[in-house]
Image: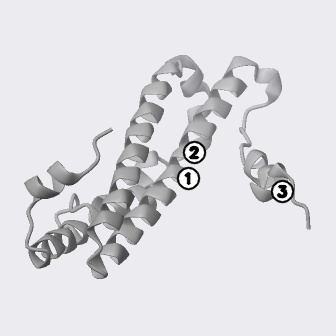
Amino acid sequence: MTRTYADFLHLPDVLGSVTPSTSPAAGRVHAAEHFFLVAHQTSELWLKHVLLDVAEALNALADRDIDQATEHVRRAADVVRLLCGHVAVLARLQPIDFAAFRPEFGTASGAQSAQFHTLRAVLGLENTQSPLCTEFLATLAEHDTDLETLYRRAPHG
């Protein structure tokens, strides 16, 4: 079976999910809302992947595979850096345009992102101990090594 790029990525579904509440006739406000939705939807997709990489890092640590765990954590960190760029690009959203479509959200807020709160918990940022850090330190101890040694042997680039 031959699949197209669009089929493989489910592009009709993904692209169809960007549905501003404002009319295209609203011009720049419609474009601003579209921009806002794309930024937030892609952020949620990236958060989903960060959580997957963190889970895989935990699985690798359960097998005491420091190298594989490190690769997953490095990739997750790269994605988090990318997410910081998402936040920065949102500064291009003009407040007057945002104010025009914000009432459509009602009480909805980015602070309600379940994935963001899950990531904060896994990282120990929700007044809990980080399972990732706990497993990582236990694995280092079992390998009779420390963070400095691990850092020195890691590829830097």
- For residue 7, which numbered disc appears in the image? 3
Instruction: Quadrant for the C terminus, please.
Output: top left
The answer to whether marks 1 and 2 mark residues whose Cβ atoms lie closer than 8 Å is yes
Instruction: Name the residue at the right extreme.
Output: 1
**Neighbourhood count class around disc 2 (C-alpha, 10 Å): few under 14, some 14–19, many 20 upward:** some
- Camera-side residue of 49 and 22: 49
Query: Helix, strand or loop at disc 2?
Result: helix
The answer to which of marks 2 and 3 sits earlier in the sequence is 3
Question: Going 38% across and 60% down the picture, which residue do you hit?
Answer: 72
Residue 57 is left or right of residue 142, and the answer is: right
Q: CA distance from mark 2 to mark 3?
A: 19 Å
Query: Helix, strand or loop at disc 1?
Result: helix
Callout count: 3
Q: Position of residue 74 (x, y in %)?
A: 34, 52
Instruction: Quadrant for the N terminus, please.
Output: bottom right
- For residue 42, which numbered disc appears in the image? 2
The answer to which of marks 3 and 1 sits earlier in the sequence is 3
Q: Position of residue 110 (x, y in %)?
A: 45, 47
- For residue 45, which numbered disc appears in the image? 1
The image quarter in which residue 105 lies: top right
- Residue flagged by tag 2: what amino acid is it? Thr
Query: Helix, strand or loop at disc 3?
Result: helix
**Neighbourhood count class around disc 3 (C-alpha, 10 Å): few under 14, some 14–19, many 20 upward:** few
**Neighbourhood count class around disc 1 (C-alpha, 10 Å): few under 14, some 14–19, many 20 upward:** few
- Camera-side residue of 123 and 144: 144
